[in-house]
């Protein structure tokens, strides 16, 4: 009875069909719970933080090149100029906020199981984590369509 009656919370949050029925194509979802989970659940913040570490360590040094690298890694396609511009604007705002409140940056980075790398600036890592959260929250990232 448990297997048939149990529905994982993410299935409800994301309007996913249950396993008891076949769905050739999942309907596009934009319910508020989906955005809240993808942006705030510790598992998703942890994934974004790990992606941000990769961005800071593996991508070229300029912010635009890093955004383009992260976009390609996440979505397997090149970002348009408009998409890069939006993320650079977000990066500027988040960087300013975290630089003015490093305690908030550290508190944010403590989400998840992994430790905060000591070789990276916490304000910069927190700002890039927000960029990674934005990328991981895109419909295109979640459904690959």
Image (cartoon, rainbow, N blue to C red):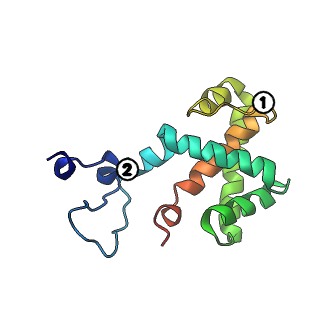
Q: Position of residue 95 (x, y in %)?
A: 73, 40
Q: Is residue 61 left or right of residue 31?
A: right
- State whether residue 112 is above or below residue 23: above
User: Looking at the image, which is closer to me, 4 or 70?
Assistant: 4
Q: Would you name the residue on which mark 1 appears?
A: 118
Which sits earlier in the primary sequence, circle 1 or circle 2?
Answer: 2
Q: CA distance from mark 1 to mark 2?
A: 35 Å
Q: Is residue 89 left or right of residue 2?
A: right
Q: Residue furthest right?
A: 61
Q: Which residue is mark 2?
A: 32
Q: Is the residue marked by circle 2 packed among few (<14), some (14-19), or many (20+) residues within 10 Å?
A: few
Q: Residue at x 60, y 31 (%)?
A: 108
Q: Position of residue 76 (x, y in %)?
A: 64, 70
Residue at 74% x, 62% y: name it.
Answer: 69
Query: Is 102 placed above or below 62 here?
Result: above
Q: Nearer the viewer, mark 1 or mark 2?
A: 1
């Amino acid at each position: 009875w448990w297997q048939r009656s149990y529905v994982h919370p993410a299935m409800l949050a994301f309007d996913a069909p249950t396993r008891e029925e076949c769905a050739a194509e999942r309907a596009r979802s934009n319910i508020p719970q989906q955005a809240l989970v993808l942006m705030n659940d510790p598992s998703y913040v942890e994934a974004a933080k790990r992606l941000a570490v990769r961005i800071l360590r593996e991508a070229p040094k300029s912010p635009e090149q890093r955004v383009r690298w992260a976009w390609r890694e996440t979505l397997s396609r090149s970002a348009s100029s408009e998409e890069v511009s939006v993320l650079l604007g977000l990066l500027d705002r988040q960087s300013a906020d975290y630089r003015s409140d490093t305690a908030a940056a550290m508190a944010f980075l403590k989400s998840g199981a992994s430790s905060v790398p000591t070789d990276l600036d916490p304000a910069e890592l927190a700002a890039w984590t927000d960029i990674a959260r934005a990328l991981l929250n895109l419909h295109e990232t979640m459904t690959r369509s």
